[in-house]
Each structure stands twice: as structure tokens, then as C-alpha cells.
């Protein structure tokens, strides 16, 4: 089969790899029909995730069709259409029993990280009964690709950890796909204001269409001054960091109001400064999280009922075999006006 293979920082290749086989009784082999590229994949290619070794197939999102199942798989059979979760869960360890699937002692975020991933014609999914979801007949599978990772990530790591409440002012730093996912799902809780901060005018325009009440181009104006102006000099009740660089995390520390919450979502490859000389008396909370995907079933229902439309985040389509072009487009998102890309295995 063909797959996108990582060969060290800045080096990837679309090449021939052996088709995956069942290794454990709980495995399933899935033929990928649609997948995508995540900002985390770009962090891997920058060298920010050193656990990813030479030869690893990238990718942790997608939908597909079951080709084969191990002897202990009971929830799925050959021919089932499935959503692949970016998080693999054994369902039995202490962390899984607490709903912290991201820290599963036998799984967690392993696809495209510690084991081969989904940017391939086929992939092996361990603990299939707990790590796949049935796709209802007639469902929009492109939209559901957004539920592999970015929708639950924006929701769980940003909105839920940020404790967004009715009437709150929410500031989201970063209007990329995950920041926009946080924007979409924050509206479940009726905040009074959602302020999107990003240096890309195209992404800010999308933010407005998706429900942002205010947008700030922090390349053209001082984001802190503008947020203070919009909030009567108080700051935001919830600040969501959705970029993953020191500068944006530092900005969040200045944007948060006393008693507020900073919810980090971004993947950080470098150390950041924590300004306790300012924050020690401000009664704030700072949270970190890797998505657990515990909300995926609920999010699937909201998509099926048309209460949530993640397809709005898709801007480009490619054949899976054209994945290098897709990466170039995604890596130059400002130039290409790209959010999420869909790669179809035909």
C-alpha cells in the first residue's frame, strides 16, 4: 500500500509500505476512505514531537471501512463504515475508567505518533471496540472527519476546560481549525462575546461567519489594548490558547480577567514564561489537556441533528495520492486560505 512516511524533521515521503495486519485480538484493519492533515502533523515535521521516529506513517484522523477484525472484536464487522478516533482506548486501565483516554496505559495518542497512522490506504486500529465509532447510514463522512480530532479537541481542551458559561466573554487566540472548533462549540453555552484573535484576515472573516462577535488582527493592532477596550478594562473570562507558541501563551496571560480561566489547547514545542509576578493574586486557573474524545458520541449527535456543521471548516480537497501537494497547501495556509483539507482514497 501507499502511505505518507516521516523520515525526520522536515522530511516526509509518499512511498510503498506493507499493508497492516491484525497483531492483537482487539485490532481492526480499516481501509481509509477520507483523512486529513492536523496542525500536530506540522509540529511533528518541525521536530517538536521527538517520540515520532524515522519510518512512522503519519496521521491520526479519518473515516473508513472495516476490512478485517481480530477475534475479540465484537462491536464491528467487515464492511462497517467507521469514524477513527485520534485517541486509542483500552477501556480497562485506571485512566480509561476515569475517562482520561488520552492517558490510556495501553493506548492514548498513538496513531501517527507511536504506531503507524491514517495517512495511508490502510491502517491498523488497536482496541477497535473502544476506539472506533459506527457511522450512521447517509451521514456526511467528510464532516465526520472533523470529529476524529479537532472538534473534540477544541471542545474538551478549550471550551470545557475553560468552563465557558452563559454571559461570559471568551477570547480565542488562534483562528486555525482548532480555534474555530472552539468557536463553534463555545456557542453551546451562550457566551455574551467571543473574540477571535489572529493575524490572518481571511481566517478572521471565517470566524465572523461562524459566530465570532469581535475579531482582532494582532498584526495590525494591539490585541491586549483592544480586549481591554471591549471588556471595560477587565479582560476575558475564558481565554483559549489555540496556537502553541510562547508568544500566544504569553498574550493569554495578559488577556485573562481576575477570576478567569486560561485553557491551553496548542501543542508547545518550546518552553514558555509563566508570569506569576502578575497572576499570583488574580484568582485564575490555567489548564492543560490532551483530548480524551469522551465527547465524540455527543458531538456526532449534534452533527447528525444539524446543530453543528463542522463541514464549514473544510476548504480544500485532494486525492490521497496527492498528499504532498495537500501538505504544501496546509503548511502555507495564509497564502492558500486553507483551514482543513480532505484527502480521499479512491
Image (tube, rainbow, N blue to C red):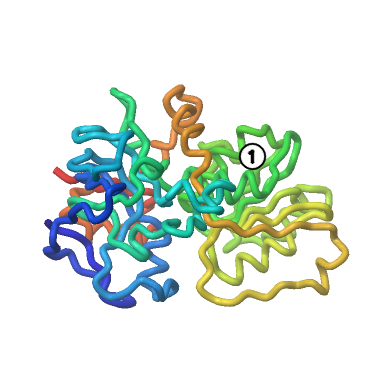
**Looking at the rendering, which quadrant does residue 145 occupy?**
top left
The residue sitting at 61% across, 70% down in the picture is 247
Q: Is residue 319 above or below residue 298?
A: below
- Disc 1 target residue: 213
Q: Is residue 142 above or below residue 235?
A: above
**Picture coordinates of residue 313, whole percent (x, y):** 41, 42
Quarter of the picture holding the N terminus:
bottom left
160 and 318: which one is in front?
160
**Looking at the rendering, which quadrant does residue 272 occupy?**
bottom right
The residue sitting at 54% across, 76% down in the picture is 270
**Picture coordinates of residue 12, whole percent (x, y):** 24, 70
Q: Is residue 77 above or below residue 229?
A: above
Visible residue check, residue 175:
no
Q: Is residue 83 above or below residue 2?
A: above
Visible residue check, residue 232:
yes
**Picture coordinates of residue 48, whole percent (x, y):** 44, 73
Q: Is residue 330 left or right of residue 191?
A: left
The residue sitting at 29% across, 23% down in the picture is 138
**Picture coordinates of residue 297, whole percent (x, y):** 47, 34
Local secondary structure at mark 1: loop
The residue sitting at 71% across, 72% down in the picture is 274
**Looking at the rendering, which quadrant does residue 112 occupy?**
bottom left
290 and 68: which one is in front?
68
Q: Assess disc 1: are there few (<14), some (14-19) or many (≥20) residues with their C-alpha within 10 Å of its C-alpha.
A: some
319 and 6: which one is in front?
6
Q: Is residue 243 left or right of residue 4?
A: right
Q: Is residue 278 left or right of residue 301?
A: right
Amino acid at each position: 500500500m501507499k502511505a505518507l512516511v516521516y523520515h525526520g524533521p522536515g522530511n516526509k515521503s509518499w512511498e510503498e509500505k506493507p499493508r497492516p495486519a491484525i497483531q492483537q485480538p482487539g485490532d481492526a484493519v480499516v481501509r481509509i476512505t477520507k483523512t486529513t492533515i492536523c496542525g500536530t502533523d506540522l509540529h511533528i515535521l518541525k521536530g517538536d514531537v521527538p517520540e515520532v521516529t524515522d519510518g512512522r506513517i503519519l496521521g491520526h484522523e479519518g473515516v473508513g471501512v472495516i476490512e478485517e477484525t481480530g477475534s475479540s472484536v465484537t462491536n464491528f464487522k467487515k464492511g462497517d463504515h467507521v469514524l477513527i478516533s485520534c485517541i486509542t482506548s483500552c477501556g480497562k486501565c485506571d485512566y480509561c475508567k476515569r475517562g482520561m483516554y488520552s492517558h490510556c496505559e495501553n493506548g492514548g495518542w498513538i496513531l501517527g505518533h507511536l504506531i503507524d497512522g491514517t495517512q495511508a490506504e490502510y491502517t491498523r486500529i488497536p482496541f477497535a471496540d473502544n476506539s472506533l465509532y459506527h457511522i450512521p447510514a447517509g451521514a456526511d463522512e467528510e464532516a465526520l472527519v472533523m470529529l476524529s480530532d479537532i472538534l473534540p479537541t477544541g471542545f474538551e481542551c478549550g471550551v470545557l476546560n475553560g468552563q465557558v458559561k452563559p454571559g461570559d466573554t471568551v477570547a480565542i487566540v488562534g483562528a486555525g481549525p482548532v480555534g474555530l472548533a472552539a468557536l463553534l462549540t463555545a456557542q453551546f453555552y451562550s457566551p455574551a462575546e467571543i473574540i477571535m484573535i489572529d493575524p490572518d484576515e481571511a481566517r478572521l472573516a471565517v470566524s465572523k461567519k461562524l459566530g465570532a462577535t469581535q475579531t482582532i488582527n494582532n498584526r495590525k493592532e494591539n490585541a491586549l489594548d483592544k480586549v481591554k477596550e471591549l471588556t471595560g478594562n477587565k479582560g476575558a473570562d475564558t481565554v483559549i490558547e489555540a496556537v502553541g507558541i510562547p508568544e500566544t501563551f504569553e498574550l493569554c496571560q495578559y488577556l485573562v480577567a481576575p477570576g478567569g480561566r486560561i485553557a491551553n489547547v496548542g501543542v508547545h514545542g518550546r518552553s514558555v514564561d509563566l508570569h506569576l509576578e502578575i497572576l499570583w493574586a488574580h484568582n485564575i486557573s490555567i489548564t492543560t489537556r490532551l483530548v480524551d474524545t469522551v465527547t465524540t458520541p455527543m458531538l456526532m449527535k449534534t452533527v447528525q441533528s444539524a446543530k453543528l456543521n463542522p463541514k464549514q471548516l473544510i476548504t480544500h480537497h485532494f486525492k490521497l495520492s496527492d498528499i504532498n501537494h495537500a501538505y504544501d497547501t496546509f503548511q502555507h495556509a495564509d497564502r492558500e486560505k486553507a483551514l482543513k483539507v480532505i484527502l480521499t482514497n479512491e
